[in-house]
Amino acid sequence: MSALSANTDGLGRRRAVNRLMETIATLAAFAAVGVLAIMVVSVARRGGAAIDWSLFTKTPHPFSFTNEPSGLANAFVGTLVIVGFATAMAVPVGVLSAIYLNEFARPRVAFLIALALDVLNGVPAIVVGIFVFALIVLDHGQSALAGSFALAILMIPLIARATQEVLALVPQATREASLGLGVSRWRTTLGVVLPQTIGGILTGTTLAVARVAGETAPLLFTSSIVGDRLQWNPHQALASVPLKIFEYSESPDPKDHAQAWAAALVLIGFVLVASLIARALAAHSRRRMGLHR
Amino acid sequence: MLTAVPTTPPEPRVEVLTPQATLPPPERRQPVFDIRSLTASYGSVPAISGVSMEIYENLVTAVIGPSGCGKSTFIRCLNRMNDLVPSFSAQGEVLYHGVDLLGSGVDPVAVRRRIGMVFQKPNPFPKSIYDNVAWGLRALGMKDDLDGRVEHALTQAALWNEVKMRLKTSALELSGGQQQRLCIARAIAVQPDVVLLDEPASALDPIATASIEDLMHDLKREYSFVIVTHNMQQAARVADMTAFFSLSAVGDGGQRSGVLVEYDSTQRIFTTPADRRTEDYVTGRFG
């Protein structure tokens, strides 16, 4: 008898349970990957053929059922403008609220603000859309800026929480070093703490951009009554990629269907690339932090 | 098979190496701090109770005592560093040239501007060597002759010759001892009045420790130092005055808190202490 066989109570059963649970967990993990793979493949099969240069350079042709080249340039430009302004609004508010949360707030206030950000993060996009509709659109009409405002509301909690997480990773000793010199709290945050967290802030921002670039519901209320001309003016309602996908999915023209699939593929590709960039930025910032420890 | 480890004989009394001549007689000592019945607490638990002592200009004052006796809490009261701890509170008075630092109208930023601090673990910023020293100068508007000020501070901290060729490289590439001297350079670059050192050598090897002790010795003509240390030999080597803290039961509940047991010249503390507890500690019978 070997030394290991002395205590074998239920060893076979325990080994079987271990193997079973490992298998189930593995299957669950691969199911998530599988769903993504099936989605990407099916969108690519239906939309891949319609992706060409004119998709990005041409605006929609005024008539259906023609073979003239047409595209969704106005929607891509619109999404670029709307998300661009949304990011410009959300980054300062998100980063500053994270700074307040992590650097200035008393624990109880910080808890309440963190809770509020989490609740805001959970508010359905359509509710945000209605809110901005009542706040801005009823009086001033639709505009890309109103859409940006709605998207910014969705981005703020994402950016704030991501920023707060990296701020919390900055060692307290770094702050003490600066405060111990008689440097003010804000100057310390700006000059010593924030430079260490740029990677994390960019990661959070990238993920937030990827998330809202595909948002449809808020834009339905704020920037949906649009023509097919290429426009850059943010004071007008602008077309957007997700709304165009929605509109074309109801079109009778099969060419529109193909373009909707193509646009969907572009959106997925954008999210994928953005996530990879975010990953790389996060890894870069972790390395910097690790060096500091 | 274990071989018998030769047992070291009990440590003799710590030899005091600070030249006695540098300690002026009591009537010629100029107080920088006059601390009156200072009690400091985290939440409702007092870390130190009823500490009263004077700290003198251009001397090195050591604070020694066993772990948990409130040495760090005490030194952090002297520049309001404990304000960063949300549950912290302090009663009593910490008079700095006659101004009560615990008073309501006192801005902790202004306090720390005059009373600098060096921490237990070297904590350089993840910036270049130059920018580490220049950071405080820039932030405080001391921008004239920045290069000269940086060089002067690094020279005073006995680091200039080692780093002058690589001022633009990251401070994190320096050794632990060099990092700590950089932190001292950073603290003295902004020309404080007092420098507080919270166990500055506890993470360093003996050679780096010696160089830091040397530079304290050289710099005390310009600054007043208060140093917390675990290491009695270090206190004996660098300090003119020594305060011994210990844990003691205070109040009715039998709650234990750090108290100042004895405060005198380093010579007296290590050779003829007045209090039995001090004697036990410095002779190694306790602690």
Image (cartoon, coloured by chain):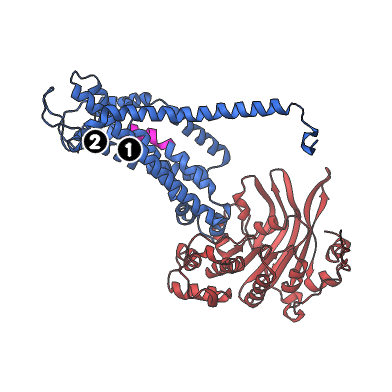
Chain colours: A blue, B red
Rendered position, B264 above or below A151: below
Q: Which residues are magenta?
A: A148-157
Q: Position of residue B202 (x, y in %)?
A: 69, 63
Q: Nearer the viewer, mark 2 or mark 1?
A: 1
Magenta stretch: residue A22 in it? no
> Where on the picture, by quarter, is residue A132?
top left
**Disc 1 secondary structure class:** helix
Name the foreground residue: B31 vs A157: A157
Left/right of residue A204 with respect to residue B223 in the rendered view: left
Q: Earlier in the sequence, mark 2 or mark 1?
A: 2
Left/right of residue B31 with respect to residue A154 in the rendered view: right
Rendered position, A140 above or below B129: above
Badge 1 density bin: few <14, some 14–19, many ≥20, Cα 10 Å: some
Q: Quadrant of the C terminus of chain A?
A: bottom right
Name the foreground residue: B143 vs A37: A37
Q: Quadrant of the N terminus of chain A?
A: top right
Residue receiving disc 2: A76
Residue receiving disc 1: A270
